[in-house]
Image (spheres, helix red, strand yellow):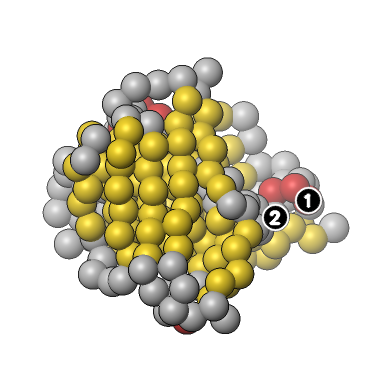
Amino acid sequence: GQNIDQPTEMTATEGAIVQINCTYQTSGFNGLFWYQQHAGEAPTFLSYNVLDGLEEKGRFSSFLSRSKGYSYLLLKELQMKDSASYLCAVPNTGGFKTIFGAGTRLFVKA
Amino acid sequence: SQTIHQWPATLVQPVGSPLSLECTVEGTSNPNLYWYRQAAGRGLQLLFYSVGIGQISSEVPQNLSASRPQDRQFILSSKKLLLSDSGFYLCAWSNGVRDYGYTFGSGTRLTVV
């Protein structure tokens, strides 16, 4: 089966850096996704990691360690608009079904 | 470019009433289509997915059903709504999860009263 764990909430200050962790258990690995979801809106795709290491995309970076079943999303130079939920997700081996974590609600304060 | 439309945006329905939510995708062919539900403060729960016309896989036994009458149309239905059916319903499509992840519709907030 598959299981995903993320912290429920985090608070950070505008301009700072925050790291959101995700641990997962899956019977077969087919990559890991991060999505951003603002309150009342649909999730939007942020990143996809299938190989170990850090992938950087502007202010956002995502890291993966397959041997540890671990990923993190790194947000730099935080802005107020980054206040949102961040969802970690892993597709099943066939790729047709993706299991989402409950999400981490990030509050950015001035 | 590809777009996904989902309607209605908001719905308030009495217990025991029927439900029909519709989702259509434009600009692509033979997409994988999904229905997810998100309860307040919770993660996304996969309800149904479809890899082709008439092909529906159900993930959670419940009083909901899904149909795919056309290649780019996905419908979520219920004959009799329960209070527990309240939530945020999201339709999504993909043409290869590995490369692009999912693109979600704008969602339907359903409140069963």
B20 with respect to B96 (left or right): right
Report x, y in % for residue A39: 66, 58
Can the viewer see residue A77?
yes
Which residue is under mark 2? Answer: A83
Between the C-alphas of marks 1 and 2, the distance is 6 Å
Q: Amino acid at mark 2?
A: Ser
SS at circle 1: helix
Q: Numbered disc 1: what chain?
A: A
Q: Numbered disc 2: what chain?
A: A
Please tell me which residue is depicted at 33% across the width and 65% down the height of the picture.
B64
Above-or-below relation of A94 to B78: above
The front one of A59 and B100 is: B100
Query: Are the residues under marks 1 and 2 on the same chain?
Result: yes
Please tell me which residue is depicted at 62% across the width and 29% down the height of the picture.
A58
Please tell me which residue is depicted at 21% across the width and 40% down the height of the picture.
B54
Farthest right residue? A110
Q: Amino acid at mark 1?
A: Met
The front one of A37 and B24 is: B24
The front one of B37 and A106 is: B37
Report x, y in % for residue B48: 29, 53
A43 with respect to B46 (left or right): right
Above-or-below relation of B57 to B32: below
Which residue is under mark 1? Answer: A80
SS at circle 2: loop
Label 2 environment density (alpha carbons within 10 Å; few <14, some 14–19, many ≥20): many
Report x, y in % for residue A94: 17, 41
Please tell me which residue is depicted at 22% across the width and 48% down the height of the picture.
B56
Residues at circles 1 and 2 in contact by the CB criterion of under 8 Å: yes
Report x, y in % for residue A32: 35, 43
Quadrant occupied by the C terminus of chain B: bottom right
Can the viewer see residue A45?
no
Label 1 environment density (alpha carbons within 10 Å; few <14, some 14–19, many ≥20): some
